Amino acid sequence: MSNTKVKWFDEDYDLGADISKLIKLGFKNTTWKDDIAPSFSNHKLQIFFLNRRKFKDHEGRSKFSINKIDEHGETIKHLYETDHFYKVLQLAELSNEY
């Protein structure tokens, strides 16, 4: 697996996943500096890449947090958290079908 890093708060943040697979599914980096963590989104889902070892706000949470978003990118509802990237990819693929 190839890990990908993004800039977040002026540091290299290791996403802990090969996001090239998300990019192939139409996801883009939608990270904002004031978000809880870096994120990638398509037109229906936003996926946050949490780091519970480094950030106190992430403690007790899974590695990936997935939210349903509206056409403006605003969160409608929290859907799912998981530590497994293959599950993230499954939801990402399903979001493109509907």
Image (cartoon, rainbow, N blue to C red):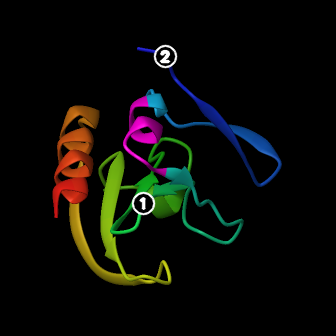
The reply to whether residue 76 is visible in this rendering is yes
User: Measured from the top left, where is residue 68 in percent x and y?
Assistant: 29, 73
Q: Which numbered disc, 1 or 2, marks the residue that appears first in the sequence?
A: 2
Given the current orientation, which residue lies at the most extreme front position? 97
Comparing 98 with 9, the one in front is 98
What residue sits 49% from the left and 16% below the top?
2
Locate the C terminus and report the quarter of the image it occupies. bottom left
* Secondary structure of the residue carrying numbered label 1: loop
Q: Does the magenta stretch include residue 73?
A: no
* Mark 1, other Cα within 10 Å: few <14 / some 14–19 / many ≥20: many
- Left or right: 29 as drawn, with respect to 82: right
For the record, the magenta segment spans: 21-27
The reply to whether residue 81 is visible in this rendering is no
Q: Which residue is denoted by mark 2 in the rendering?
A: 2
How many numbered marks appear? Answer: 2
Locate the N terminus and report the quarter of the image it occupies. top left
Callout 1, which amino acid?
Asn
- Left or right: 88 as drawn, with respect to 48: left
User: Measured from the top left, where is residue 76 in percent x and y?
Assistant: 32, 85
Which label sits on residue 19? none
* Mark 2, other Cα within 10 Å: few <14 / some 14–19 / many ≥20: few
User: Measured from the top left, where is residue 58 in percent x and y?
Assistant: 44, 57
Q: State the image quarter where residue 31 is shown.
A: bottom right
Q: Which residue is denoted by mark 1 in the rendering?
A: 42
- Left or right: 54 as drawn, with respect to 85: right
Given the current orientation, which residue lies at the most extreme top position? 1
